[in-house]
Image (spheres, rainbow, N blue to C red):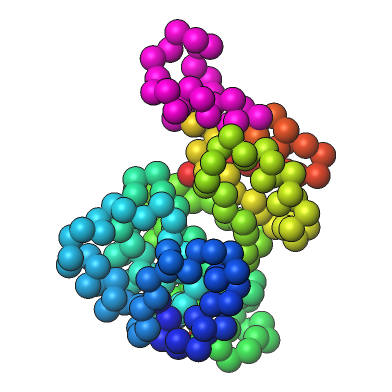
Amino acid sequence: MDINKENYELGLPVIEKAGVAHKIDFREGPALPVVDQMIEDGKYHGTFDFIFVDADKDNYINYHKRLIDLVKVGGVIGYDNTLWNGSVVAPPDAPMRKYVRYYTDFVLELNKALVADPRIEICMLPGAYFIFEDADKDNYINYHKRLIDLVKVGRVIGYDNTLWNGAVVAPPDDAPMRKYVRVWRIAAEVVEAEGNCADTKFSRSV
Ligand SMILES: C[S@@+](CC[C@H](N)C(=O)[O-])C[C@H]1O[C@@H](n2cnc3c(N)ncnc32)[C@H](O)[C@@H]1O
């Protein structure tokens, strides 16, 4: 969703090159009414693994109130720049650009609401952008070996479900689990072991 289709079109060649254009359902316009429509539809409730919000910060709190309905239990909602250029901890008289000052209170309001929200766990990622990997888990380690080259120093690679439904700590062969869970638990173990290597810091989140 974006109020400006040109921004979407700017990124489209990259999306096409990645071969994922068929997965994008772009909606032009203010996001709130689109989100409201999705909630009203009913069919999107609890369906999103991952939602990323990087638009009008004076509406972040309104997005949160709605997106919590749309994200899966255990899913992730990412809010861009919740430190808002450091302004959320700056003294009131600190020099800052007008637009930064304008949005500061809105970002603070969101942060306070997130802290008080018992439905979520919070994690601050040390970078604006990151790589999120949630595909064939038997290749996670191969992705990791390559992605470490692509990610910026200090930024984040997220691997989905490295507890792998709890299978990584289940007894070796006799714990009841679905076949695909058993097959891929080795992959999750390898990422835990090898992902925690010299060039990465490891942290577990939601
Ligand atoms: C800082 S840019 C981020 C875009 C993208 N995440 C990126 O990093 O390339 C913010 C985007 O939000 C869009 N935007 C602003 N207000 C919006 C709204 N009310 N609804 C939907 N999109 C909006 C802008 O057009 C712009 O493309």
129 and 41: which is toward the camera: 41
The reply, left or right, for residue 119 in relation to residue 5 is left
The reply, left or right, for residue 158 in relation to residue 53 is right
Residue located at (40% from left, 20% from top): 177
Q: Is residue 156 above or below residue 52?
A: above
Q: Which residues are magenta?
A: 165-190
Q: Is residue 5 above or below residue 90?
A: below
Q: Is residue 168 magenta?
A: yes
102 and 132: which is toward the camera: 132
Which quarter of the rendering shows the N terminus?
bottom left
Q: How many numbered callouts?
A: 0
Q: Is residue 145 magenta?
A: no
- In the rendered image, the residue lying farthest to the right is 198
Dominant secondary-structure state across the stretch colored magenta: helix
Q: Is residue 37 above or below residue 143?
A: below
Question: Looking at the picture, how far across and down is residue 158, in whole percent?
Answer: 59, 49
Question: Looking at the picture, how far across and down is residue 171, in whole percent?
Answer: 50, 11
Q: Is residue 34 visible?
A: yes
189 and 120: which is toward the camera: 189
Residue located at (62% from left, 56% from top): 131
* Residue 83, picture quadrant: bottom right
* Residue 5, picture quadrant: bottom left
The reply, left or right, for residue 11 in relation to residue 60 is right
Residue located at (50% from left, 81% from top): 8
Q: Is residue 83 visible?
A: no
- In the rendered image, the residue lying farthest to the bottom is 98
Question: Looking at the picture, how far across and down is residue 34, in whole percent?
Answer: 29, 76
Q: Is residue 124 above or below residue 177?
A: below
Residue located at (41% from left, 72% from top): 60
Question: Looking at the picture, how far across and down is residue 120, in whole percent?
Answer: 40, 49
